[in-house]
Amino acid sequence: MFRRPVLQVLHRFVRHASETAAGLVLQRSLNRVQLLGRVGQDPVLRQAEGKNSVTIFSLATKEMWRSGESEVYQMGDVSQKTMWHRVSVFRPGLRDVAYQYVRKGSRIYVEGKIDYGEYMDKNNVRRQATTIVADNIFRVTRQKRK
């Protein structure tokens, strides 16, 4: 039977009903992020008391679109927006490599998951933070043209 690759992927990750545990139907979900952009600051290695260390850096991504009705490319028709992402690396081997080799301005590809958290600032005000928890980081280099 012929199946489309997209349907195979969806079937693999999203199942409508799986095993039942005490009458509860378990479902799978997916929290996955892929970013390609430039590093905005050199990584910082932080360690809180009694906790594992973490490497943190910012990553800029751009979204570009054409404004207006024109299909023909003109200089004034293209708009762009830069979005900044906070990337945290907790995995011991990847954390150390990211701290040592990732540098400001580097073009990298990050795979991971999105995490929403809260913290208390210096004035005891509760703040919310969105972080990308990296599982893999790849440095992107340009291929030479022949």
Image (cartoon, grey):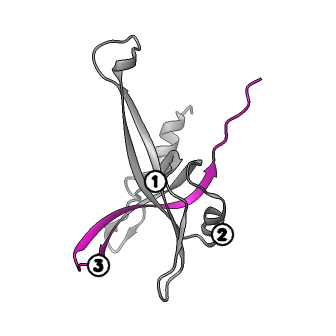
Q: Which residue lies under the disc numbered 1?
A: 32
Left or right? Give the position of 12 relative to 16. Answer: right
Crowdedness of circle 2 by 10 Å Cα count: few (<14), some, many (20+)?
few
Q: Is residue 142 above or below residue 43?
A: above
Q: What amino acid is labelled 3 in the image?
A: Lys
Magenta region, mostly helix, strand or loop? strand
- Circle 3 SS class: loop
Residue at left offset 36%, top offset 12%: 71
Q: Is residue 136 above or below residue 48?
A: above
Would residue 30 be seen by someone viewing this image from the given angle? no
Q: Is residue 76 above or below residue 94?
A: above
Q: Is residue 40 magenta?
A: no
Q: Which residue lies under the disc numbered 3?
A: 122
Q: Is residue 121 magenta?
A: yes
- Circle 2 SS class: helix
Q: What amino acid is labelled 2 in the image?
A: Gly
Would residue 58 be seen by someone viewing this image from the given angle? yes
Give the CA distance from mark 1 to mark 2: 21 Å
Q: Earlier in the sequence, mark 2 or mark 3?
A: 2
Left or right? Give the position of 126 relative to 66. Answer: left
In the rendered structure, which segment of residues is drawn in magenta? 117-146
Q: Which residue lies under the disc numbered 2?
A: 93
Crowdedness of circle 3 by 10 Å Cα count: few (<14), some, many (20+)?
few
Specify the quadrant that holds the C terminus: top right
Residue at left offset 52%, top offset 60%: 134
- Circle 1 SS class: loop
- Number of marks in picture: 3
